[in-house]
Amino acid sequence: MQHTDTSPQAEVLPSEQGWTEVIAPHAPWWDLRLGELWRYRDLILLFVWRDFVSVYKQTILGPLWHIIQPLTTTVVFVVVFGNIAGLSTDGQPAFLFYMAGVTIWNYFAGCLNRTSSTFVDNAAIFGKVYFPRMAVPLANVISGLLAFGIQLGVFLCLYAFFALRGEALQPNWWLLTLPYLVLMMALLGLGLGILISSLTTKYRDLTQLVGFGVQLLMYATPVIYPMSSLSPRWQQVMAFNPIAPIVEAFRYAFLGTGVFNASMLFYNAVVTVVILLLSLVLFNRVERNFMDTV
């Protein structure tokens, strides 16, 4: 007669079963699990390559659009705002002045536009397999950095051309802050983007307003005009825009003209950190049940 053991069995831990990953709900709102991003770094790199290639995969000119787009935008700005409207360029060559603003602004606008639709655009992937949701917006920021590198290279070529022509360009030591400026622009675009993406899971109207809002924000930022062309009162108002110090500092580093001081960058850093932390907390809360609303 076979004996059946009815004694209580010891609980088998996941590690004893051979599992390497245990997915469980996490309650604390401050648990952002940022360490997971490093463990999924290979996946992030795949997303970076996907984002960079997919945009121009079935186009005729391909990555050349990274060069054509800023050059075309700069030409339009020179004609409309430089020649027709007669806006000041701080005594610098108009083409170089507008190209500097377009280069740094395009990176911010790209980060914001791509990350603002993270949940909506990737709902199908999020519903099938687990990985840190923050990997997608982070990959958007990194892939945008590749495009920024190309456009910065074009700007540097133009900069060298105007310097050889004898233009009164005044590069200075603030060029050393270029990595910091790019980092702040990336974090600000990431923070605002994931903030909007978290809200769009419930309020879809925001997706229609993002593109329009980014265009309005550009006109509220010294991209097509220098802050020095504004009255002192409006310069104080403009200083509350956290993007303005980055654009002004970028131009000042290369051209040596503009309204810029270190306190403006400090203000930008504080605002950027606050926005990023608030956005991460909101993103962390929304990702738990966003599939029920998307």
Image (tube, helix red, strand yellow):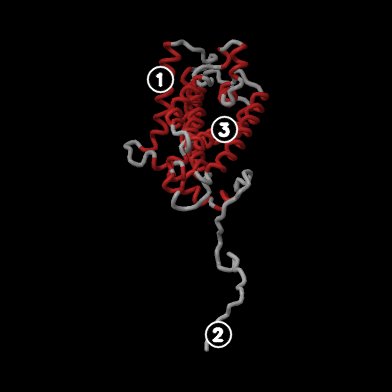
Please state the horizontal and vertical placement of residue 102, each as a whole percent of the image: 48, 25
Mark 3 or mark 1: which is in front?
A: 3
Q: Examine the rendered structure and indicate whether residue 154 appears above or below residue 141.
A: above
Pick the front one: 69 or 194: 194
Q: Quick check: can you spot residue 257? A: no
Q: Is mark 2 on a helix, strand or loop?
A: loop
- Which numbered disc covers residue 188? 3
Residue ID for mark 1:
76
Q: What element carries label 3?
A: helix
Quarter-wise, where is residue 16 in the image? bottom right
The three-letter code of the residue at mark 2 reads His
Q: How far apart are marks 2 and 1 (CA)?
A: 88 Å
Q: Which of marks 2 and 1 is nearer the N terminus?
A: 2
Figure quadrant of the C terminus = top left
Helix, strand or loop at label 1? It is: helix
Q: Residue at x 60, y 45 (%)?
A: 32
Q: Looking at numbered disc 1 in the image, what kind of residue is underneath it? A: Val
The residue indicated by pointer 2 is: 3
Is mark 3 in CB contact (under 8 Å) with mark 2?
no
Q: Residue 207 appears at what percent x and percent y? A: 44, 32
